[in-house]
């Protein structure tokens, strides 16, 4: 296999058209340079350089190979430079998977902060079903995943980040909205809207309904939190929504109000995950800690209102 050093010698000869000057540029003796270029030609099975008394000229195939070698040398130098610069920070494009029940309402301020701190980091953000994205993470299609627990996959490191309250909401004219005091027993038999069954939040809402004797409306499953919000605002049923969605600019409380039954304590846990032994594992952990700090600060602000 030709070596990078041999290609460097070839490019030097092409630039100087002289073996002596090329050897000086490469900081080797002329015999060493000549010997290595002979070895390169033998390995490739073709003549790359026409040697004559006036200097050295590339053959047509020599020119083509030199052009490719020049690009290869530049790429290798870029890789080396990238490695040196990325000792502490992730460089380039990071593929981040996130659940649609979290990403649009948590990530905007975090993405802006990460860009300020790591301007060479690019985030390719993909929303998807957590179980499907955990599989993509295991296969290397994603670098890091942000979603609700549990996150299950082969050889994944899972780092819990924060706990988010789940709120039960209703249209202002819903009978439960008019009660001066509300208990969990009052929720028995109430109809509840949710996302389609592929979502983790759907299963959690179904478990809450089973726990409290509520009825999950399986014929009216939403494709997004906004759809569930709007259906609840129309009076079709109650909805159980994450607090970050409710407090966000794109979510909010338009057409609904939060019910506060005594004893309501339902939450979900959000975590980050990446492949165990990933080359950038320490950097992924640093990013996860950054997300954790911002999310916990945001949740604290919400709970203090």
Image (spheres, grey):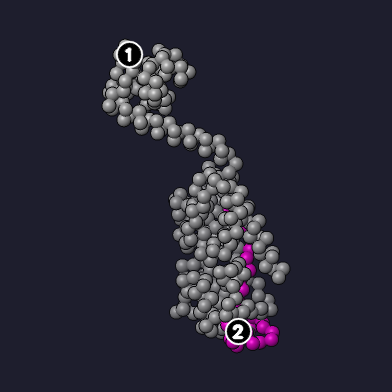
Q: Is residue 165 visible?
A: yes
Q: Which residue: 54% across, 63% down?
A: 104
Q: Helix or strand or loop: what does disc 2 sit on?
A: loop
The crowd level at tag 2 (other Cα within 10 Å; few <14, some 14-19, many 20+) is some
For the residue pair 94 and 250, the one nearer the viewer reads as: 250
Q: Is residue 214 left or right of residue 12?
A: right
Q: Is residue 256 left or right of residue 10?
A: right
Does the magenta run of residues contain 183? yes
Residue range highlighted in magenta: 158-185
Residue 36: x and y in percent read: 38, 19
In which image quadrant can residue 20 be found?
A: top left
Q: Which residue: 63% across, 78% down?
A: 258
Q: Is residue 194 left or right of residue 19?
A: right
Q: Is residue 160 visible?
A: no
Residue 293: x and y in percent read: 66, 56
* Residue where numbered disc 1 is placed: 54
Residue 131: x and y in percent read: 48, 60
* Residue where numbered disc 2 is placed: 172
Q: Helix or strand or loop: what does disc 1 sit on?
A: loop
For the residue pair 198 and 68, the one nearer the viewer reads as: 68
Location of the N terminus by quadrant is top left
Separation (CA) of disc 1 from disc 2: 93 Å
Look at the numbered discs 1 and 2 and tell me whether their residues touch, using CB distance below 8 Å.
Answer: no
Q: Which residue: 60% across, 63% down?
A: 269
């Amino acid at each position: 296999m030709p070596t990078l050093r041999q290609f460097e010698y070839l490019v030097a000869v092409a630039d100087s058209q002289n073996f002596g000057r090329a050897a000086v540029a490469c900081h080797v003796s002329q015999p060493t340079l000549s010997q290595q270029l002979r070895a390169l030609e033998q390995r490739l099975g073709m003549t790359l350089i026409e040697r004559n008394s006036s200097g050295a000229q590339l053959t047509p195939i020599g020119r083509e190979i030199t052009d490719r070698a020049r690009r290869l040398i530049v790429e290798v130098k870029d890789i080396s430079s990238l490695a040196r610069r990325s000792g502490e920070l992730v460089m380039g494009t990071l593929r981040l998977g996130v659940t649609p029940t979290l990403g649009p309402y948590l990530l905007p301020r975090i993405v802006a902060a990460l860009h300020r701190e790591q301007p060479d980091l690019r985030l390719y953000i993909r929303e998807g079903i957590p179980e499907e994205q955990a599989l993509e993470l295991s296969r290397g299609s994603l670098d890091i995943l942000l979603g609700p627990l549990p996150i299950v996959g082969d050889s994944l490191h899972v780092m819990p980040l924060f706990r988010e309250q789940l709120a039960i909401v209703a249209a202002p004219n819903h009978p439960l909205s008019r009660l001066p005091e509300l208990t969990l027993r009052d929720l028995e038999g109430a109809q509840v809207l949710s996302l389609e069954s592929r979502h983790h939040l759907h299963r959690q809402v179904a478990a809450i309904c089973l726990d409290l004797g509520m009825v999950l409306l399986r014929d009216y499953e939403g494709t997004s939190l906004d759809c569930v919000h709007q259906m609840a605002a129309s009076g079709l049923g109650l909805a159980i929504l994450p607090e970050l969605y409710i407090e966000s600019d794109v979510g909010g409380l338009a057409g609904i109000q939060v019910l506060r039954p005594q004893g309501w304590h339902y939450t979900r846990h959000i975590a980050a995950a990446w492949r165990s032994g990933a080359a950038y594992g320490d950097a992924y952990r640093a990013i996860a800690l950054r997300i954790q700090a911002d999310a916990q600060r945001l949740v604290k602000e919400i709970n203090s209102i």
